Amino acid sequence: MKKIVILISGLGSNMQALLEAKLPCEIAAVISNRADAQGLEIAKAHGIATAVVAHRDFADRASFDAALAKVIDGFQPDLVVLAGFMRILTDGFVGRYQGRLINIHPSLLPAYAGVNTHERALKDGVKIHGCTVHFVTADLDNGPIIIQAAVPVLSNDTPATLAARVLHEEHRIFPQAVRWLCGEQRWLDAQGRIASNRLEQVGTTLISPGLD
Ligand code: GRF
């Protein structure tokens, strides 16, 4: 069975969705860069090993990333899952885990890479927003896309209401992405594209605002 390590920084609701999804993999550890991350308690309650590598204890990104990699490698994971991990990683770290490092991002990439995605989407007046699970590459929020979910943006949305609608979908697509990768139903091919051994489902169309 494949092993995964999950990295968090805060609430850990995406991590919790993964813990509760009965995934076909062993969740070897949850690691946080903040000792006060609420998600650590949730992980402990699920009987998962936890560790803290506090970025504030290190002089620069490279030394933090090296210490983090050492702890991760102690668990020998097949997949490293960034679940609300709010640190930008060095190219060295990303290269070390190339093809086995994934992230969830609260926008329909390549739109709204970076932070404050919901505020920016509202400001632009887009009618559809969403979330993306992707492989991590040296370009921020720019690696091969595994799965996306789209939600409507409503006229009375605030960043908070829109974030909640997106987060609900994050909790659905993230376990699916990990299930695919752990079950070898989706993988990165030699050209760096997502390959699959499954027939694609058409899914549903989202038109926003809806037609009368
Ligand atoms: C999520 O919206 C995630 O996409 C973003 O930060 C948030 C983390 O939420 N990167 P949680 O810690 O998983 O609850």
Image (cartoon, grey):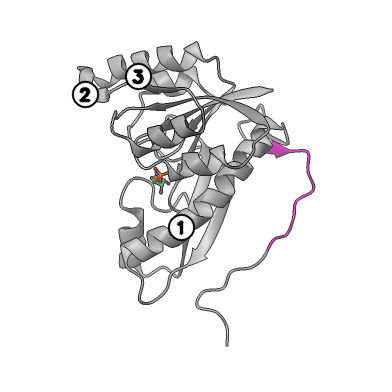
Say what amino acid the circle numbered 2 marks.
Arg
| Left or right side of 55 for 130 | right
| Left or right side of 164 for 193 | right
Secondary element under disc 1, as helix, strand or loop, is helix
**If the picture is divided into quarters, which one holds ligand 1?**
top left
Any atom of ligand 1 within 8 Å of the CB at mark 2?
no
Q: Earlier in the sequence, mark 2 or mark 1?
A: 2
Toward which corner of the image does residue 33 lie, by quadrant? top left
- Comparing marks 3 and 2, which lies closer to the viewer? 2
Q: Which mark is residue 3?
A: none
Q: Residue at x 78, y 43 (%)?
A: 198
Q: Measured from the top left, where is residue 126 in percent x and y?
A: 41, 68
Q: Outermost residue, bottom direction? A: 212
Q: Residues within 10 Å of mark 1 (few under 14, many from 20)?
A: many
Any atom of ligand 1 within 8 Å of the CB at mark 3?
no
The magenta segment is 195-203
Which residue carries the number 2 mark?
Answer: 56
| Along the viewing direction, whichever of 167 and 148 lies nearer the viewer | 167
- Callout 2–callout 1 Cβ contact below 8 Å: no
* Whether residue 163 is situated above or below residue 194 in the rendered picture: below
Tell me if residue 157 is in the magenta stretch. Answer: no
Say what amino acid the circle numbered 3 marks.
Asp
Q: Residues within 10 Å of mark 3 (few under 14, many from 20)?
A: many
Say what amino acid the circle numbered 1 marks.
Val
- Comparing marks 3 and 1, which lies closer to the viewer? 1
Q: Residues within 10 Å of mark 2 (few under 14, many from 20)?
A: few
Q: Which mark is residue 166?
A: 1
Q: Earlier in the sequence, mark 3 or mark 1?
A: 3
Q: Earlier in the sequence, mark 3 or mark 2?
A: 2
Which residue carries the number 3 mark?
Answer: 65
